[in-house]
Image: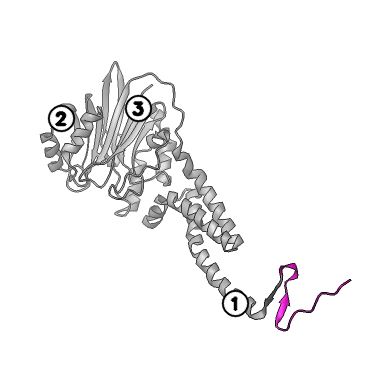
């Protein structure tokens, strides 16, 4: 058998792959820790976010903000995994891809429409709009109501001045019935309807800011409506959680109910999913549009405005609309009642 030639001085054999000098091996070793560390840095928060999402823990304002970005984290995790594998950091790439897949399983179904119940009751067209401290263009809001043939309009961040502007724009000629609680800043809300309204307390301690009403649709059909606007969690996270819980009475314990407005929460927040688990569906998710962002309107990032529907009903349409003067998009759903 022919003997292989001895390696040159200063070189070490690498089997069938060839040889590498000691200096070359040292250069590779010197680069490895830095590259590995740079890849680990984004992996740690990705793993933490996935853990929070899976265990259903909202935490404080910072973790709430991070959870709201879960769809973006899913894409970032996939990119991180591919990059790490390309750089031969196998365990980092593998873990990043696993985390990305786990989050994708939670996020991607929002792009697919769900089968709806075969119901044949009355149709209700609902619009909810955050008026940004009353600064939204009242004429634009009224135009939306007219163009989309809205039956029920929920308004939040509704100031006394906004009510004056909506009155002048002709809103109450289109929707004559109203339950209004205007207030300065972000604390006013109201429900305006084509159908007669009877104000009822459907949200406990937060009823003044999250008013409720029974809408008489005729023929003995009554729908319960809630204008949703829990406090922003960056202002008071515990209060946000309490006001979200005011919405979560089980659907089977009351009449057919629709919750619409600015929830200050996404589908990745456990508090919001708790509301849904009590017998409700998110209209955007049912329509396959739950990744369509609603805030901020100038550079849409997250979906925190929702129309939430009793799961005994069907969602036949869902859309979002820009409203000049507001930082939120208005959300619209057409609901077919049983």
Q: Give the SS element for disc 3.
A: strand
Query: Is any part of residue 255 visible from this angle?
Result: no
Q: Label 1 to label 3, Cα distance in Å?
A: 65 Å
Query: Within the image, what quadrant is residue 21 found in?
Result: bottom right
Mark toward the viewer: 1 or 3: 1
**Sequence-wise first label, 2 or 1:** 1
Q: Position of residue 83 (x, y in %)?
A: 53, 60
Residue 212 spot, x, y in % from top left: 27, 33
Q: Is residue 225 above or below residue 337?
A: below
Marks 1/3 in contact by CB < 8 Å: the verdict is no
Label 2 Cα neighbours within 10 Å, binned few <14 / some 14-19 / many ≥20: some
Q: Residue furthest bottom?
A: 9
Chain-order first, disc 3 or disc 2: 2
- Residue 122 visible in the picture: yes
* Left or right, residue 226 beside residue 20: left
The residue depicted at 14 percent of the width and 36 percent of the height is 166
Task: From the image, tell me which residue sits under label 1.
Answer: 27
Residue ranking furthest to the top: 219
Tag of residue 335: 3
Q: Which residues are magenta?
A: 1-17
Q: Indicate which disc, 1 or 3, sits on the residue closer to the N terminus.
A: 1
Name the residue that disc number 2 marks.
Answer: 172
């Amino acid at each position: 058998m022919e003997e292989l030639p001895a390696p040159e001085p200063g070189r070490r054999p690498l089997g069938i792959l060839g040889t590498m000098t000691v200096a070359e091996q040292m250069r590779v070793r010197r680069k490895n820790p830095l590259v590995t560390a740079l890849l680990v840095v984004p992996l740690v928060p990705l793993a933490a976010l996935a853990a929070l999402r899976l265990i259903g823990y909202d935490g404080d304002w910072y973790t709430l903000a991070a959870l709201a970005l879960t769809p973006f984290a899913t894409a970032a995790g996939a990119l991180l995994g591919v990059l790490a594998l390309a750089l031969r950091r196998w365990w980092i790439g593998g873990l990043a891809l696993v985390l990305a897949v786990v989050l994708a399983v939670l996020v991607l179904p929002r792009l697919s429409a769900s089968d709806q119940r075969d119901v044949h009751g009355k149709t209700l067209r609902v619009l909810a709009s955050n008026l940004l401290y009353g600064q939204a263009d009242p004429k634009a809001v009224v135009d939306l109501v007219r163009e989309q043939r809205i039956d029920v309009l929920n308004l939040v961040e509704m100031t006394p001045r906004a009510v004056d502007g909506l009155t002048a724009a002709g809103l109450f000629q289109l929707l004559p019935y109203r339950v209004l609680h205007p207030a300065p800043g972000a604390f006013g809300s109201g429900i305006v309807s084509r159908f007669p309204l009877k104000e009822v307390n459907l949200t406990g301690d937060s009823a003044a800011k999250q008013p409720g009403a029974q809408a008489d649709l005729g023929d003995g059909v009554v729908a319960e409506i809630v204008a949703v606007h829990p406090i922003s969690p960056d202002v008071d996270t515990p209060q946000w959680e309490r006001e979200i819980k005011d919405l979560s009475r089980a659907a089977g314990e009351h009449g057919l109910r629709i919750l619409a407005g600015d929830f200050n929460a996404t589908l990745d927040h456990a508090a919001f999913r708790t509301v849904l688990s009590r017998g409700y569906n998110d209209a955007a998710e049912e329509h396959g549009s739950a990744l369509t962002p609603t805030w901020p309107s100038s550079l849409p990032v997250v979906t925190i405005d929702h129309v939430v529907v009793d799961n005994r009903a069907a969602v036949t349409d869902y859309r979002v609309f820009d409203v000049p003067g507001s930082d939120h998009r208005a959300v619209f759903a057409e609901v077919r009642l049983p």
